[in-house]
Image (tube, helix red, strand yellow):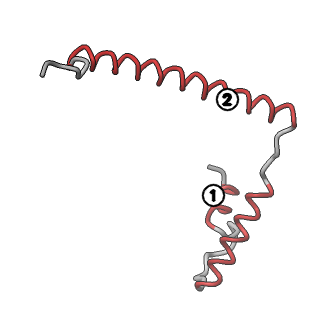
């Protein structure tokens, strides 16, 4: 980890010693760090967003198919093992 990344994660510059912050000082530091991190966020372009959406939807469809097949197989196996439930009276 670089010195810059290490010092920024501690909340103080690398040249200055850390000082004890109060409750509200800690909250203010946290909010400043949150804002600094949010400034680093890069929003995707429309093309990227469409591509990501298609990938997620395709993954969900594949997972639905897999779970449905497993449900059918285990259901059929349970019927085979335990019978149809209409047994003799």
Residue that badge 2 annotates: 57
Most extreme residue toward the left is 89
Viewer-proximal residue among 6 and 85: 85
In this picture, residue 24 sits left or right of residue 44: left
Around disc 2, counting alpha carbons within 10 Å, would you say few (fewer than 14), some (14 to 19), or many (20 or more)?
Answer: few
Examine the rendered structure and indicate whether residue 7 appears above or below residue 41: below
Most extreme residue toward the front is 89
Which secondary structure, mark 2?
helix
Which secondary structure, mark 1?
helix
Viewer-proximal residue among 57 and 80: 80
Viewer-proximal residue among 14 and 89: 89
Residue that badge 1 annotates: 6
Most extreme residue toward the right is 46
Examine the rendered structure and indicate whether residue 79 appears above or below residue 9: above
Q: Which mark is residue 71?
A: none
Measured from the top left, where is residue 75 in percent x and y?
34, 21
Q: Residue at x 58, y 82 (%)?
A: 20
Measured from the top left, where is residue 1 in percent x and y?
62, 49
Q: Residue at x 21, y 16 (%)?
A: 81
Measured from the top left, where is residue 89 in percent x and y?
12, 22
Examine the rendered structure and indicate whether residue 8 appears above or below residue 62: below
Q: Residue at x 17, y 19 (%)?
A: 87
* Cα separation between marks 2 and 1: 38 Å
How many marks are shown on the rendered structure?
Answer: 2
Query: Which is closer to the viewer, label 2 or label 1?
Result: 2
Examine the rendered structure and indicate whether residue 6 appears above or below residue 83: below
Quadrant of the rendered image containing residue 72: top left
Around disc 1, counting alpha carbons within 10 Å, would you say few (fewer than 14), some (14 to 19), or many (20 or more)?
Answer: few
Asked whether the residues under the numbered discs 2 and 1 touch, taking CB atoms below 8 Å apart as contact, a structural biologist would say: no
Q: First in sequence: mark 2 or mark 1?
A: 1
């Amino acid at each position: 980890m670089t010195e810059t990344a290490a010092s920024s994660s501690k909340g103080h510059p690398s040249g200055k010693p850390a000082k004890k912050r109060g409750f509200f000082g800690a909250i203010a530091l946290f909010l400043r760090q949150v804002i600094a991190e949010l400034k680093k966020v890069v929003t995707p372009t429309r093309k990227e967003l469409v591509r990501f959406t298609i990938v997620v939807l395709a993954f969900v469809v594949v997972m639905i198919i897999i779970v449905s097949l497993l449900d059918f197989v285990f259901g059929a196996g349970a019927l085979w093992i335990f019978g149809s439930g209409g047994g003799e009276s």
